[in-house]
Amino acid sequence: NAGVTQTPKFQVLKTGQSMTLQCAQDMNHEYMSWYRQDPGMGLRLIHYSVGAGITDQGEVPNGYNVSRSTTEDFPLRLLSAAPSQTSVYFCASSVGLLGEQFFGPGTRLTVL
Amino acid sequence: KNEVEQSPQNLTAQEGEFITINCSYSVGISALHWLQQHPGGGIVSLFMLSSGKKKHGRLIATINIQEKHSSLHITASHPRDSAVYICAAHSGSARQLTFGSGTQLTVLP
């Protein structure tokens, strides 16, 4: 099993550009989530999904969109990048809401 | 909203020392997770517990539901234990985890 994979590992964008961060898992997990990690702050939830076709907002959803067309994939879209979105992004999955969390390796995004 | 506080923020220890990292939360929870973030950035799950105590190798996690407090202990610490340790609480009514800001542990040889 590859576990949770994320691409790209690094990305530099200019303000106003859009992009999609990819996340995939091969463990048949229902629950997937996107977090951002900023210095001095805990991981903060952006969006999550409890199954294919079902998504919901987390703590900091503004400026991001998600969709879940399959169990395996959960892409995160930045609609119009802003410097405030410079962060490290982690995707995670688990069997259920309370299950052991499996994290991807992260994507380091810089918005100029 | 559940507030999760970790202490200390930074901890430096000598190899072989017994280490304790603390986590407090403000509302009742269904489960508490301890995670380890390696210097390279990857995050792995160490423990998930809702009561009592769990042990894995040199790591021990305990939780006191009444006190709203959990501890992570590392026995016979080693430089390879150097990492950021993060606790995260899951409230029964919330569909998400609330994370502490992490404890940076450095173990010196």
Image: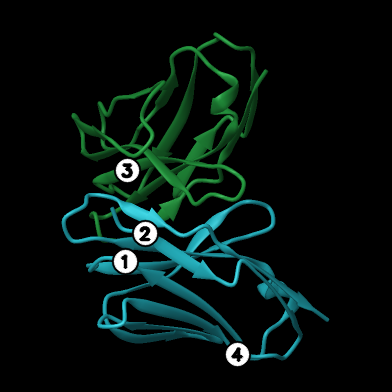
Q: Residue B26 carries which label?
A: 1
Q: Which residue, given by chain and number where applicable, does mark 2 sit on?
A: B3
- Residue farthest to the top, as pictured: A16
Are the residues under badges 1 and 2 in a single subunit?
yes
Chain letter for the residue marked with disc 3 in the picture: A
Q: Which of B36 and B4 is in front in this view?
A: B4
The answer to whether one can see residue A90 in this image is yes
Of all chains in the rendering, the one displayed in cyan is B
Kindly identify the residue that appears in the image at 35 percent across and 82 percent down: B63
Quadrant location of residue B13?
bottom right
Are the residues under badges 3 and 4 in a single subunit?
no
Q: Nearer the viewer, mark 2 or mark 4?
A: 2
| Sequence order check, earlier mark of 1 and 2 | 2
Instruction: Give the vertical position of B31 relative to A83 (above or below).
Output: below
Estimate the x, y position of residue B45 in percent, counting from the top left. Answer: 45, 64
- SS state under label 2: loop
